[in-house]
Image (cartoon, coloured by chain):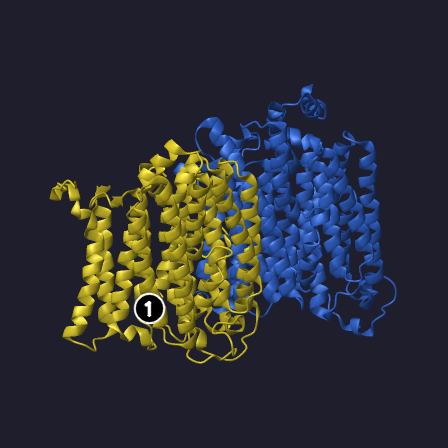
């Protein structure tokens, strides 16, 4: 006999849904506008998307933390931090559509609608502790993202989209199997109930199933976060996608995936299940090292940046294994700082995007293209060098602070060796970032070209300006950022 | 003038930023003017420095990242004061004597930024700030070597960068560990060096932390097995790059030992006296022998740099005030002398476009003034009494004699071996008949060059005859450092060594 559910509207706590609803209705609105009057200029949609994200961000900031919607939604500090990152990165991404040259994908309003839907999906993903809703969020956002990649409309892009789609489907399969295993052992898909069930019944015969479930989910996230050995798709996909989208993919879906990974694996870490912890640690160390070594031999800047962002993800993944509040804070502080720099670097590639491959048959952005850039566009070379130095972790630029804090959290928790490995990896990484600087500053231009600033436009310069400002000025807001994120993390118990 | 240190650190960088506006043909004068103002500021600091107060002065301290204990913390004591003055002085002289024509504007701006980082390293009292300037100094140097250097410049500059960068990342882990230990002990985060001085460690921790810092500093010095980047960097760098590299950048490493390693890890430092002394002596003798085998004048001086830095290291690990004060003094003298020698090689390279000794011979008869200046600097480098080089070297040897007479005698051969390769260089290039007829047309030092060299010669002789005004201030602060070490040392052996080696004070 099923008892009828008695829920008042107040208990549903619908305001929690407001941020996602804004995004969803905004996306629908974009489609409706297109239906009413087609052939509107992309700038309209860019501005509309910006407004949607702005409104979304304000609602997120104004929402009271809590549960709602049959306890499916969990609007805690973790979710707020991660939504803020997602939205700010999206707001930085959208203006990049306003290039001086015309690109195919931005002429479709659907591009913007899909993009907004994707953000809504990511928001759902981070605002729940229900394994099923997480799955729905992942799939919503991923499906939208596959389409966005393919819309770049080059053979490489189709390849990238199909590759990403296939990998994503495999990951989704792993995720579903892992969730099923966990459900089978604990009888719940709510993480807090799973946590309770595990701590009560931990240590009995189904340990294999418990860890097995975690490992399957870990594999799924390893695909999403491009961790070794599930990283092989990343460079190809980044190369095929347009530069800003590649930059976006190296940040936003990863932030969301880290949020969920933190939610799921912190249960295991807190329970002291060492096998899971050591698997994560090993994955993290191997990822950062191998990706760094692969990045050394790349001939294309975009592929180098792809490997570099894999390495950064591996770096951050270690924080999940460390499992202290400081480490959890470090994840988001790191990504908050990395976001500006990395998006800035990809935007610089976007500025230099040209239709014909002038320098190499194979690559769009070989190192040679940037040779002697200091002589052609001095300002551009300086800015790009700033981003590279920041990525390498040279103080006082933004990523240094993230690295510092993350390494410090490793040292605090007694992982000295990990911290040393992180340090050495940063040193390896410095080489390939330097390589670009060497090309830009110390080599002669190969062909007299205006190509390195082919695509420049005012909105792009604004985005670059913001990125430079955040990269250079990070020392002034790191304090505030740290306090805010730390407070949010400790409130939500991570 | 409570904020003079901030001005000293950031004035060159600010001027560098404004330098982008200056017209190409006027930047040189601009650079010299800024460097001169900076030098006058540093002299002003010296004048206002209370020489009786051995602790940090002109302190500026406020938090940057409160929750994480990172603060803006500047201060100067007797040890750093003269390194700052030497830095600004050598930058000024380097700027004046610069002969680069290509992209001069970029060079001037880069030098000004470099000056900020160098002054910053010596004045920062917060470990993160120190690290910030320490790492940032690599970038301008990378550009200077890479853009204006010789044929292998890119290789040399990247090697220089990666070598130092890897070492300092290990050091960073060490710093984080110290900060965490401070947090566990005191309940609050702090990266302030003065706070760290109050912190004691177990022997085992001291040992590992000492090693972590050692890697960072030793690569910069450069200590013997890590020295391979230096000959490349010097060989490829333009004159100004070599001058700054030898005069200032190498001192950062030895300064780091005095500022961090000794007072923070006294027991480990005492434990490491013998291994480090042996490494230093290898540095002194081995590189001197390598220097003798060089054909290239610049390489001779580059290797002699390593050799002299060995003496500096030895003095630091003498653990007594003579040794350490002598080391700090030797840092200054080496800065001035090796800077001058690199400039002198630059002068002849400028005229003949070669640095090989075999191309020269009998230069003394063609360029008497040049030969004279070279001779003075060479004598100072060898450590002839009444020159600046003698004071530091002598004090270091006296200081280390108390630790180990045998090792001191070995190190003392540096004066002899140094004389061998330096005089060989002098003989082959300056004396004898003029072997290369083309050299007969060489012009002697011009007015511009004389203006650069006369102050250097004056300094070399003045401080050689009367080092007291400098030495007494250094000595004051060194004694404070030693008393910190003495209080902190936990093992009786270390305490005993530190006390017994400073018996003079005990009286």
| Residue at point 73%, 70% (across, down) | B352
Q: Chain coloured yellow: which letter? A: A
Residue in view at x 31 percent, y 51 percent: A134
Percent across and percent down for residue A213 are: 42, 46
For numbered disc 1, what is the local secondary structure? helix
Quarter of the image where one finds residue B469: top right
Could you tell me residue A465's position as x and y percent? 36, 62
Q: Is residue B440 left or right of residue B206?
A: right
Instruction: Relative to B153, say whether B482 is above or below.
Output: above
Q: Is residue A345 above or below residue B476?
A: below
Q: Is residue B5 visible?
A: no
Q: Which residue is mark 1?
A: A147
Q: Residue at x 19, y 57 (%)?
A: A22
| Rendered shade, chain B | blue
The image position of residue A413, as x and y in percent, is 49, 36
Q: Residues within 10 Å of mark 1 (few under 14, many from 20)?
A: some
* Residue nearest the observer in this picture, A275 or A448: A275
Left or right? Give the position of B268 relative to A355. right
């Amino acid at each position: 006999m099923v008892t009828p559910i008695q829920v008042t509207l107040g208990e549903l706590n619908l305001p929690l849904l407001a941020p996602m609803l804004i995004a969803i209705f905004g996306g629908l609105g974009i489609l409706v506008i297109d239906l009413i009057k087609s052939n509107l200029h992309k700038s309209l949609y860019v501005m509309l998307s910006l407004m949607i994200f702005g409104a979304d961000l304000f609602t997120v900031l104004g929402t009271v933390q809590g549960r709602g919607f049959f306890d499916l939604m969990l609007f805690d500090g973790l979710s707020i931090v991660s939504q803020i990152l997602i939205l700010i990165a999206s707001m930085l991404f959208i203006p990049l559509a306003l290039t001086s040259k015309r690109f195919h994908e931005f002429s479709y309003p659907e591009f913007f609608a899909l993009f907004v839907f994707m953000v809504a999906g990511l928001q759902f993903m981070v605002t729940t502790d229900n394994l099923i809703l997480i799955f729905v969020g992942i799939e919503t956002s991923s499906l939208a993202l596959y389409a966005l990649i393919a819309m770049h409309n080059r053979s490489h892009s189709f390849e990238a989209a199909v590759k990403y789609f296939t990998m994503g489907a495999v990951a989704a399969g792993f995720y579903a199997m892992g969730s099923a295993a966990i459900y089978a052992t604990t009888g719940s898909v709510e993480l807090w109930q799973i946590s309770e069930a595990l701590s009560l019944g931990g240590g009995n015969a189904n340990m294999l199933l418990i860890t097995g479930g975690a490992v399957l989910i870990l594999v799924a996230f390893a695909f999403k976060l491009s961790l070794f050995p599930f990283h092989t798709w990343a460079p190809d996909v980044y190369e095929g996608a347009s530069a800003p989208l590649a930059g976006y993919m190296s940040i936003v879906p990863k932030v969301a995936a880290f949020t969920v990974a933190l939610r799921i694996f912190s249960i295991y870490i807190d329970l002291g299940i060492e096998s899971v912890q050591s698997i994560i640690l090993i994955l993290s160390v191997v990822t950062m090292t191998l990706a760094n070594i692969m990045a050394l031999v790349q001939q294309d800047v975009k592929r180098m940046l792809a490997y570099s962002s894999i390495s950064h993800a591996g770096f951050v993944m270690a924080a999940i294994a460390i499992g202290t509040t400081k480490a959890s804070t470090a994840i988001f502080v790191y990504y908050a700082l990395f976001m500006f720099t990395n998006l800035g670097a990809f935007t610089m590639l976007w500025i230099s995007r040209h239709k014909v491959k002038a320098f190499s048959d194979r690559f769009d952005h070989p190192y040679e293209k940037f040779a002697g850039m200091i002589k052609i566009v001095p300002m551009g070379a300086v800015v790009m060098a700033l981003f590279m130095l920041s990525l390498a972790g040279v103080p006082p630029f933004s990523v240094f602070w993230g690295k510092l804090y993350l390494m410090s959290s490793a040292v605090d928790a007694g992982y000295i060796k990990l911290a040393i490995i992180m340090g050495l990896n940063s040193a390896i990484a410095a080489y390939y970032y330097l390589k670009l600087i060497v090309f830009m500053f110390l080599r002669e231009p190969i062909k007299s070209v205006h190509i390195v600033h082919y695509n420049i436009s005012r909105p792009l310069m604004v985005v670059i300006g913001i990125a430079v400002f955040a990269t250079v000025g990070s020392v002034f807001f790191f304090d505030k950022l740290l306090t805010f994120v730390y407070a949010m993390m400790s409130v939500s118990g991570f | 003038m409570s904020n003079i240190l901030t001005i000293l650190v950031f004035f060159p960088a600010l001027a560098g930023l404004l330098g982008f506006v200056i017209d190409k043909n006027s930047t040189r004068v601009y650079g010299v003017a800024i460097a001169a103002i900076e030098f006058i500021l540093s002299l002003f600091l010296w004048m206002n420095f209370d020489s009786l107060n051995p602790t940090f002065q002109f302190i500026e301290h406020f938090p940057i990242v409160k929750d994480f204990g990172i603060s803006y913390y500047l201060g100067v004591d007797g040890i750093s004061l003269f390194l700052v003055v030497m830095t600004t002085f050598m930058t000024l002289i380097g700027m004046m004597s610069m002969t680069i024509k290509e992209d001069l504007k970029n060079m001037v701006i880069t030098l000004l930024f470099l000056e900020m980082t160098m002054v910053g390293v010596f004045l920062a009292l917060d470990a993160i700030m120190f690290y910030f300037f320490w790492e940032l100094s690599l970038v301008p140097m990378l550009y200077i070597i890479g853009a204006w250097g010789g044929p292998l410049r890119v290789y040399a500059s990247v090697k220089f960068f990666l070598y130092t960068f890897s070492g300092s990342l290990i050091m960073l882990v060490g710093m984080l560990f110290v900060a965490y230990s401070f947090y566990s002990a005191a309940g609050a985060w702090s990266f302030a060096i003065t706070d760290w001085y109050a912190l004691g460690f177990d022997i085992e921790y001291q040992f590992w932390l000492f090693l972590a810092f050692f890697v960072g500093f030793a690569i910069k010095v450069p200590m013997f097995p890590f020295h391979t980047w230096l000959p490349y960097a010097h060989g490829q760098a333009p004159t100004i790059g070599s001058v700054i590299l030898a005069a200032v950048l190498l001192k950062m490493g030895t300064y780091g030992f005095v500022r961090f390693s000794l007072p923070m890890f006294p027991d480990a430092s005492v434990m490491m006296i013998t291994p480090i002394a042996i490494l230093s002596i290898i540095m002194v003798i081995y590189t001197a022998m390598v220097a003798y085998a060089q054909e290239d004048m610049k390489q001779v001086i580059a290797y002699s740099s390593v050799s002299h830095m060995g003496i500096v290291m030895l003095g630091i690990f003498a653990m007594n005030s003579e040794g350490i004060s002598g080391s700090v003094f030797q840092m200054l003298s080496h800065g001035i002398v090796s800077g001058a020698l690199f400039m002198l090689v630059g002068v002849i390279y400028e005229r003949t476009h070669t640095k090989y000794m075999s191309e020269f011979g009998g230069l003394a008869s063609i360029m008497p003034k040049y030969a004279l200046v070279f001779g003075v600097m060479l004598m100072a480098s060898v450590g002839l009494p009444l020159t600046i080089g003698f004071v530091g070297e002598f004090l270091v040897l006296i200081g280390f004699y108390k630790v180990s007479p045998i090792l001191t005698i070995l190190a003392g051969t540096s004066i002899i071996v140094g004389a061998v390769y330096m005089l060989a260089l002098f003989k082959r290039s300056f004396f004898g008949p003029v072997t290369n007829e083309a050299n007969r047309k060489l012009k002697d030092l011009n007015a511009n060059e004389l203006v650069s060299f006369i102050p250097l010669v004056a300094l070399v002789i003045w401080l050689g005859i009367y080092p007291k005004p400098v030495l007494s201030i250094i000595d004051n602060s060194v004694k404070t450092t030693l008393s910190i070490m003495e209080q902190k040392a936990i093992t009786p052996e270390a305490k005993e060594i530190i006390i017994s080696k400073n018996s003079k004070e005990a009286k």
